[in-house]
Amino acid sequence: MTPAVNLLKKHKIAHVVHEYSHDSASVSYGLEAAEKLGVIPEQVFKTLVVAVDTGLAVAVLPVSAQLNMKQLAKALGVKKAAMAAPADVARATGYVLGGVSPLGQKKRLPTVLDASAMQFSTIFISAGRRGLELELAPKDLCVLTQAAFESLI
């Protein structure tokens, strides 16, 4: 299994692993996951790694939404944020783009989870590879990543 799944097992966090056949021609990995799992896109969350003046950070938000960089910078207490370079993302997380999980990253990065997650009893996040999703309670994700709930969209 992936580092994300192993972390959940280690901490005995309730979760469900969902696997689906990933289509490499898919334009949006997150929307593909929502469609193939039969859930609304607002309940499937993507993991974006951003560069800030203090290094790298993580934003977790619905796949149907676009990240508001100003909101994220405010939540992190920095002046500005921008998408991180793909090589930096892979190096810091140990995951490939399209399969980045907020859990089990090589290096613990400051993490912000969009407040919309609180409306769901469970949300879906990448399990660490394309075609593999984790379903878990938002509060559990928050505890494991030491994330803050903030508005990111």
Image (spheres, grey):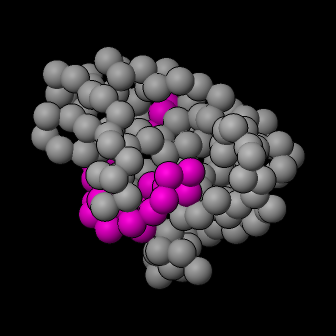
Q: Residue at x 29, y 52 (%)?
A: 88
Vertical order, 37 against 48 (above or below): below
Q: Residue at x 19, y 29 (%)?
A: 77
Residue 47 coordinates in the image, percent (x, y): 49, 45
Asked whether residue 121 is in view, the answer is no
State which quarter of the image contains the N terminus. bottom right
Residue 84 coordinates in the image, percent (x, y): 32, 40
Vertical order, 56 against 135 (above or below): above
Vertical order, 53 against 124 (above or below): above
Which of 22 and 8 lies nearest the eye of the viewer? Answer: 22
Vertical order, 80 against 57 (above or below): above
Which of 80 and 135 lies nearest the eye of the viewer? Answer: 80
Residue 13 as seen in the image, left or right of residue 39: left
Q: Which residues are magenta?
A: 92-115
Number of numbered tags placed on the structure image: 0
Residue 13 as seen in the image, left or right of residue 90: right
Which of 13 and 86 lies nearest the eye of the viewer? Answer: 86
Asked whether residue 68 is in view, the answer is yes
Q: Residue at x 32, y 18 (%)?
A: 70
Question: Would residue 116 be counted in the magenta stretch?
Answer: no
